[in-house]
Amino acid sequence: MKSRVLEIGVGAGLAVLLAACGGPQAQPTPAADSATTQSGSQSPAQNSQAPAEPVPERLDIDYVGDGADEHRLDLFLPTGQGPGPFPLVTWVHGGGWKSGDKGDIGRAEDIRMVETKQLLLDRGYAVAAPNYRLAPGATFPAPMHDVAASVRYLRAHAAELGLDPQRFALMGDSAGAHLAAMTALAPDKADLQGSLGETGVDAQVKAFVGYYGIYDLSTRTRDQKQVCGGGKPGAESSHGMLIGTDPDAPEGQQKAKAASPVTYVSATSPAVILFSGRKDCTAPYPQPEEFHQALQKAGATSELTFIDTEHADPQFWTDSAIHDKLIAFLDRHVKG
């Protein structure tokens, strides 16, 4: 039976918490064969105008220029809807900051993001999916530097790619929601945004969409313990691996807060919509709830929807009610 969708608005209280742990994790997908894909790494000077007919699929675009697999993105444009320019949703994959791949967006199993990807294309949105460096080989802020660089590349090359650089949104699931939120909420923090690739534009976006994300690394261990009895503690936790230290120790708390989207909430934050599960033990419900409340308290636009399910449930990507909320939000705040 399909779970009931609950929308949380201004001043909503805590619901009865449900203690059921677990949830599937996105698995790595082998990189596409670059010999059979189209790369879009030309500079604006080489191709400064949108194509008469948009190229529907460009794979393995090198958004930094260093040839690294971690610095490639895929771009998909709507078909049969004219030459654009199209608004863009950049989706950042999850995987506990240590796994996952941009190719997850095209898979029909596991998280089934492919269904939401097709929904976006059908509604006139281009979709991008970047890779980024993973822990433990890379620690924060390196993965965020990569996500920000991918957005800057797409804005700098918007004309030849058929995109509207003034109508960008960031979206992510799980660890990807964390990185996308950080990029969206801290566009003016040079140390967090980094200087990879294109630097003549910034990574500002009009909206952020988060699916079962982690928004306060300094309280995640507490939330997991209170909601589900606990997760991996300290430096062994996935968020500890991300920041390279124990997030629960006094010396780690500062790093955890500096790497948390909730730290950067302000009245000028982009519009936010969050989808999370009440039974989630990976990103427990206080994570989106307190992030949502902080945004509203600051005067920013925020919407929060809970469903009665676990982390990364396929329902997030297939439920028609969630689809309707997503498109209404993007049409209002991005497509305009």
Image (tube, grey):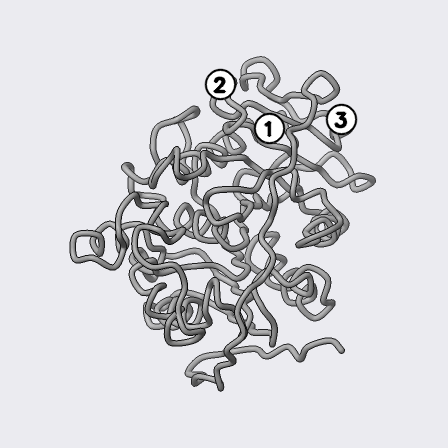
Residue that badge 2 annotates: 65
- The first of marks 2 and 3 along the sequence is 3
Q: Is residue 74 above or below residue 286?
A: above
Q: Is residue 265 visible?
A: no
Q: What is the three-letter code of the residue carrying label 3? A: Ala
Classify the position of the C terminus by image quarter. bottom right
Seen from the viewer's position, the closer of residues 283 and 332 is: 283
Q: Secondary structure at mark 3?
A: loop
| Residue type, mark 2 in image | Gly
Crowding around mark 1 (Cα neighbors within 10 Å: few <14, some 14 to 19, many 20+) is some
Q: Residue at x 54, y 35 (%)?
A: 131
Residue 267 position by quadrant = bottom left
Please tell me how crowded label 3 is: few (under 14), some (14-19), or many (20+) other residues with Cα within 10 Å: few
Outermost residue, right side: 80
Image x and y of residue 259, in percent? 31, 50
Q: CA distance from mark 3 to mark 1?
A: 12 Å
Amino acid bearing label 1: Ala
Give the x, y percent position of residue 156: 50, 28
x and y percentages locating residue 41 in the rendered image: 58, 19
Residue assigned mark 3: 52
